Amino acid sequence: MKMKGNFSLKISGPAGTGIMRAGETFSKALNRLGFYTLVYPEYPSQIRGGDNNLQIVFSSEPVNSPNEKIDLLLAFNSECLKNHRGEVKKAGRTYELGELGIKVETELVKNSATLGFLWKILGFDLKVLEEQLREDFKEEKIFKLNLSAARSGFSKGKDVGLRIWKGVENRELGRRKGIINLTGNEALVRGILVGQCGFAAIYPMTPINAVLTELSKSIVTVFRPEDEVAGILAAIGASYAGKRAMVATSGGGFSLMTEGLGMAGIAEIPLVIVLGQRAGPSTGMATYSSQADLNFAIYAGQGEFPRIILAPGDLQELYRFGAEAFNLAEEYQVPVILMTDKYLAESRFSANEGELKEIKVLKVSSGVKNPEDYKRYQLTKSGISPRAFPGQTAFLTNSYEHDEKGFSTDEAEMRNEMMEKRRGKLSGLKGGFEKYGEEGKRGTLVSWGSTKGILLDFIKENPDYNLIHFWRPWPFPQEVTSILKKVKKIIAVEGNYSGQMADLIELKTGLKVQKILKDDGRPFFKEELEQKILKLKC
Amino acid sequence: MEFVKQFFEIMNKLSDLSTGVQPTWCPGCGNYLVLAAIKKAIGELNLEPKDVVATYDIGCAANMVNNLNVCGFATLHGRSIPVAVGVKMANPKLTVIAQGGEGGIVTEGGNHLIHAAQRNDDITVILNNNYVFALTTGQTSAATPKGLKTRSTPEGNPFEPLSAIDLAAVAGASFLARTQSSDLAQTTEILKSAIRHKGFSLVEIIQPCVIWLKDYPEENKSEKYQEKPFKDIKDFFNKKNYLGILYEKI
């Protein structure tokens, strides 16, 4: 039995009350019942107090869009209630924790009490939530505290017969395993590990902190550098010495990394840069989302050198490109910038287990076989020179323009040959975009990065539209031109102020692109996006 | 006979360490002797060129990348230390040297010096201190003596100089030494000790610029230097005229 549409609820409380933890437990318990979930967090840049909130959307179909209006609000205090009351639908329900009369042994487990209460309101079996708590709290004492809180909350709730259950006989879709539940950062780290990353230099910054946390628990050598300048350079050093290496940062840190980026370009050092975008400029809105760094990533650095930019849009792509970024960096000896954003990185999505597919990982380079008369920058047809590592032979690596052996040079002829060599390296790249949906009678939507998910949801409900998702905005996949020439109209949907991808498509194809833009720190909401697209004139 | 054999062995090693490219330094520059000292130190320590990584700053001395036949990496101004740190973390078997002028190590890259010293990263930093930015035609650096007239301070440098050794000492470096480029034997021995040292080592090589340092500071004149080893950092702190291995914590 399937539910109609989706159900959206919001939990709001001060930072430090365990809201984020609750979102994970709650959504995973819903997955146990067979529901797909989306957990979208919003929080201010503070550790205690304020208003942390989570929107949890669930449905019997895959769900990729946060909603503007919610069906249920549970606020921890009157301030949070005031902040979000306006988002509740007319027929929706609102609760304030203090007025529910739930008794807990310690303030620390209020979050679990809330979950128990909500579980009852939604009319689910308490046992399923208990199983999830068992999985989430390994320590017996902590588990028991949370369990009793959840039971206490459950006892105060009552099944109110929500509208989504009208005509639904069995609210459980069938207990099942196989729905995976990960944040974007977690999926990315899984990919990074498959890609055999050996070294990560990460200076903490929202929204990539979880990448640092997760990699620190893995076999990867993790370095917390003194600044992002040192971070990218240490990663370059590690890559040069033979490890697959990466950094992760946001726009501010990437600003500091630009000189290192250029060095990786001219010295031809493989490097993966995870760039988690957030709302700028400068410190901007540090814990809010944005997609405004595409131009910056494409053009960062003085001079011209090849780079690859990947823009995964969902768990599947985060996992895939987390690994493939390292293949590409190594194969072409270039910096690869993998762009996410706060919404994609820190929201918690669900997918079917089989969708995180096996990825073919290129063998990590073992360096040069015959070190006699080795030339680090040998001119070859493909532009790619054989690599050697320190310990194999003495050779030069150079941020100055250089000759085949790596010696510094200012000679015009060698300069031209080296520029040609570097620029030619990426000429063989294939793919870069993916088409979804049928012909698109009313128009073709364009996404890059995180707008993919919500647009997939949209075209499912509006089959007159189709979608082209650019998972590799740079080098621009020129093959897309012949496809875009034939479509009714092109509509780019992006989280920035000026329409950076739209402009890039216009620049590269000469075709006119309409823009649907938003840069207020929030992702596109379902209703808002529908309105904006359907309102566009043909 | 044994001596002759040894001599030829060393000479062969030294020629292995040469790329055959002629240095571009000014006549009389201290860098010629620094290059000789580095070659001698690597040769006498019996290190293979392929097992030595030298990361270079941008500046006069850094142009040595084209002359010294090891795994050389010309990096960016002020950034030779973090590249070296990454290399060492990725492959601890390598001998890793980071070179830089006082412009790179103290001025542009001071942050990296402090933190590498704090972490006691197992690299050797060779600091070529000529008191000014030379390759950009003679401006003050953070280590320029007070009062010195340069192209950026026509009235004289208003600031007290910042000492790399003091900075590194405070941050926790475990090997600190100062030498003069004119003393090939001492520079070689100090470099050998620094490379052998497990942990962060800093060797400051004093080598006044023959072109841009017209107004050479009194306190840095060579006859004023004294050699003295110290047990505690506070004993040599803020004293610019001591030479030798100032401090080693094993």
Image (cartoon, coloured by chain):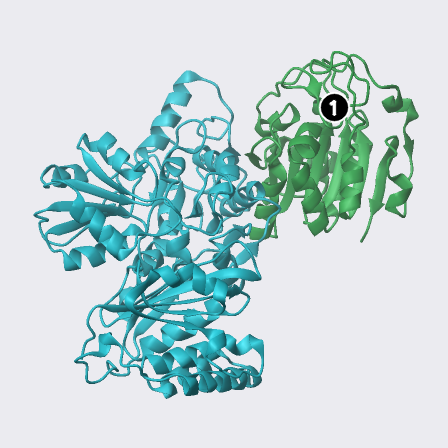
Chain colours: A cyan, B green
State the image quarter where residue A49 is shown: bottom right
Above/below status of A56 relative to B111: below
At which x and y percent is residue A254?
A: 48, 41
- Residue shown at the point (51%, 57%) measured from the top left: A212
Q: Is residue A182 left or right of residue B86?
A: left
At which x and y percent is residue B167?
A: 77, 39
**Number of other residues with Cα within 10 Å of mark 1, as a class: few under 14, some 14 to 19, many 20 or more:** many
At which x and y percent is residue B84?
A: 61, 43
At which x and y percent is residue A302?
A: 45, 28
Q: Is residue A41 visible?
A: no
Q: Mark 1 belongs to which subunit?
A: B
Q: Is residue B72 left or right of residue A164?
A: right
- Camera-nearest residue between A385 and A309: A309
For mark 1, give the secondary structure.
loop
Q: Is residue B207 left or right of residue B133?
A: right
State the image quarter where residue A194 is shown: bottom left
Above/below status of A466 relative to B63: below
Q: Is residue B118 visible?
A: yes
Where's the C terminus of chain A, which quadrant? top left
Where's the N terminus of chain A, which quadrant? bottom left
- Residue shown at the point (37%, 26%) measured from the top left: A419
Above/below status of B71 relative to A117: above
- Camera-nearest residue between A421 and B187: A421
State the image quarter where residue B125 is shown: top right
Q: Which residue was labeled with disc 1? A: B130
- Camera-nearest residue between A111 and A207: A111
Q: Number of labelled discs? A: 1
Type of residue at label 1? Answer: Asn
